[in-house]
Image (cartoon, rainbow, N blue to C red):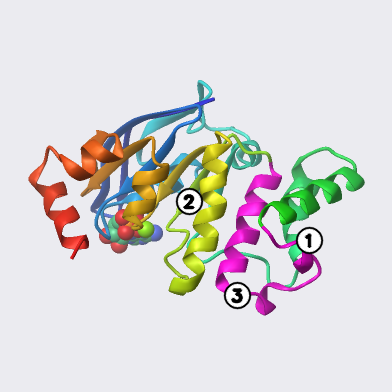
């Protein structure tokens, strides 16, 4: 598995949000994407699964250019999972049905196998007892763990996390980070936008710093956080440590 972003530009009207992003994500990498609010992190993630269409440039997934007309969007979204800040669960479906919905549509498996896998994933995120609950009766941390189980149910090749703990009360952040930490240990390829810097340092195999739609730092978390090459990144890290 590999994802290659080639010279991605994204404009909204005359605002240039991404200005030539080049990045290759290799199998098993945990890429932590950081940068100030408005630097283009979410837009870049969204370009990787075509929730946003790049204005120019290419995204190759396993060598296939997904920006070509006529690509099968469903297949791309199956391969490239996404977990959002605000969970995006379906409130009218039970927890179990939320997890099974995608596989029922796109994985050609027996209902029994889909159900079994959904329950296995629920157990993995520590929520076996919530199968029949509805999202409105769950805490934010529980909702996010369900959203992760739902993404995993599609057997994605990579999962993109867009600030998965930013909407959570502080006491719930840990339970979500624990789940992501375990996925990292299992070798799942991930791209994670986060402001949890100690977590980023711990799970990231690589850190990318985005500034005004361009990558200005790319290294290990230690290199980027402790010895940034740019004054801009140095300023960012010193301001968030206060
Ligand atoms: P980040 O995730 O780093 O905070 P975003 O990718 O969300 O940054 O946004 C980068 C810039 O693009 C911001 O100035 C934002 O207002 C703008 N932007 C994002 N999405 C849209 C949109 N759909 N329409 C217009 N402007 C947008
Ligand atoms: Mg964002």
Sequence order check: which comes first, mark 2 or mark 1?
1
The disc, 1 or 3, on the residue closer to the chain's N-terminal end is: 1
Label 3 with label 2: CB-CB less than 8 Å: no
Q: Separation of disc 2 and disc 1 at Cα?
A: 22 Å
Residue bounds of the magenta highlight = 126-154
**Ligand 2 has an atom within 8 Å of the beta carbon of the residue at disc 3:** no
Instruction: Quarter of the image for the N terminus: give it.
Output: top right
Label 1–label 3 contact, CB within 8 A: no
Look at 83% across and 37% down and name the residue there.
108
The residue identified by callout 2 is: 161
38 or 147: nearer the viewer? 147
- Label ID, residue 97: 1
The verdict on residue 147 being magenta is: yes
The percent coordinates of residue 235 (x first, y second) are 12, 54
Ligand 1 picture quarter: bottom left
Q: Which residue is mark 3?
A: 139
Q: Is residue 6 visible?
A: no
Dividing the image into 4 quarters, which one contains the C terminus? bottom left
Give me the residue at 45% from left, 70% from top: 167
Q: CA distance from mark 1 to mark 3?
A: 18 Å
Q: Earlier in the sequence, mark 3 or mark 2?
A: 3
Q: Residue at x 16, y 61 (%)?
A: 239
- Answer yes or no: is residue 180 visible: yes
Classify mark 1: helix, strand or loop.
helix
């Amino acid at each position: 598995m590999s994802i290659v972003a080639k010279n991605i530009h994204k404009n909204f009207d005359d605002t240039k949000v991404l200005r030539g992003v080049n990045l290759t994500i290799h199998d098993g990498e945990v890429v932590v994407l950081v940068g100030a609010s408005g630097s283009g992190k979410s837009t870049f993630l969204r370009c990787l699964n075509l929730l946003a269409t790049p204005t120019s440039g290419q995204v190759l997934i396993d060598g296939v250019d997904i920006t070509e007309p006529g690509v099968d969007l469903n297949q791309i979204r199956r391969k490239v999972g996404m977990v959002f800040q605000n969970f995006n669960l379906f409130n009218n479906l039970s927890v179990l049905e939320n997890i099974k919905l995608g596989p029922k549509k796109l994985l050609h498996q027996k209902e029994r196998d889909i159900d079994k896998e959904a329950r296995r994933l629920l157990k993995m995120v520590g929520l076996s007892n919530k199968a029949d609950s509805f999202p409105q009766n769950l805490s934010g941390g529980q909702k996010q763990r369900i959203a992760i189980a739902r993404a995993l149910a599609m057997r994605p090749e990579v999962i993109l996390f867009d600030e998965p703990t930013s909407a959570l009360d502080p006491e719930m952040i840990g339970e979500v980070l624990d789940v992501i930490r375990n996925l990292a240990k299992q070798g799942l390829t991930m791209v994670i936008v986060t402001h949890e810097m100690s977590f980023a340092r711990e799970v990231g195999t690589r850190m990318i710093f985005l500034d005004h739609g361009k990558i200005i730092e790319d290294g290990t978390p230690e290199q980027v956080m402790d010895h940034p090459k740019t004054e801009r990144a140095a300023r960012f890290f010193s301001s968030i440590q206060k």
